[in-house]
Structures are given as C-alpha cells and as structure tokens.
Amino acid sequence: MAEESILVFSTFPDAETARRVGRTLVEEKLAACVNLLPQVESIYRWKGKIETASEVMTLMKSTTWKYQLLEKRIRELHPYEVPEIVSVRINDGNLDYIRWIEQSVME
C-alpha cells in the first residue's frame, strides 16, 4: 500500500560518498532506489554560525517497516556528525511503482 512507502531525504558532502552510501543501502535492501541530485547549495546554522556548503541531495525510496534499519545504517555510513535524515510518507503515486518499492526491500 502507498501509505507504507516512504521517501527519505539526506544530504552528503560529495557525489562519491552519496554514491557509496546509496549503493550500500540498495544492496542491503534498505532502499529500493537512491537518486543523487548534485550541486545542492545548503545554508544552515551550525554551532552558532551561519554556514554554506555545496552538497549532494539524495532521495531514497523505502518502506515504513524498513525505516528504523535504514536510518541506523545511514547514521553508521554518514560522515556528518548530525546527518539530515527526513522521511515523508508517499500517500499517492503510480501503484506499480509503489509495489516495486515494496518488493525491492523485502527480505
């Protein structure tokens, strides 16, 4: 069902790191697909200062029942002290694609 599918956002410092982490998550069946969106400019507050950074945004498709394992693995692989890991439920979409997401992360 679509309500069990999720889209997880995370940023990485460079494409090589994002690619390595994304491949691992797909190989381990924690994500069905990881899209890399290069050259995202981020402006954020960190330790009391305003910072800017060039990053790579990733969009990961997974399921609610895999989320805890996915988040744990991202934290293990991610180089940031506090990585961005934000999940949103997919409420509607191409049902064939949604089924593919769910089938791709089944054990």
Image (cartoon, rainbow, N blue to C red):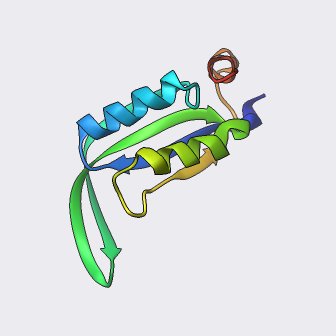
Residue 83, x across and y down, in percent: 42, 57
Which quadrant is the N terminus positioned in? top right
Residue 82 vs 104, above or below: the answer is below
Residue 93, x across and y down, in percent: 65, 28
The answer to whether one can see residue 89 in this image is no
Residue 66 vs 97, above or below: the answer is below
Measuring 66% from the left and 46% from the top, which residue is drawn there? 68
Residue 74, x across and y down, in percent: 48, 45
Residue 84 vs 32, above or below: the answer is below
The answer to whether one can see residue 94 in this image is yes
In this rendered view, identify the residue nearer to me: 48 or 91: 48
Q: Residue furthest front?
A: 76
Give the side of residue 39 with respect to residue 57, left or right.
Answer: left
Measuring 26% from the left and 77% from the top, which residue is drawn there? 50
Measuring 57% from the left and 48% from the top, which residue is drawn there? 72
Give the side of residue 87 with respect to residue 63, left or right.
Answer: left
Give the side of residue 78 with respect to residue 100, left or right.
Answer: left
Measuring 34% from the left and 52% from the top, which residue is drawn there? 79
Number of on-image labels: 0
In this rendered view, identify the residue nearer to me: 94 or 10: 10
Q: Quadrant of residue 103?
A: top right
Which quadrant is the C terminus positioned in? top right
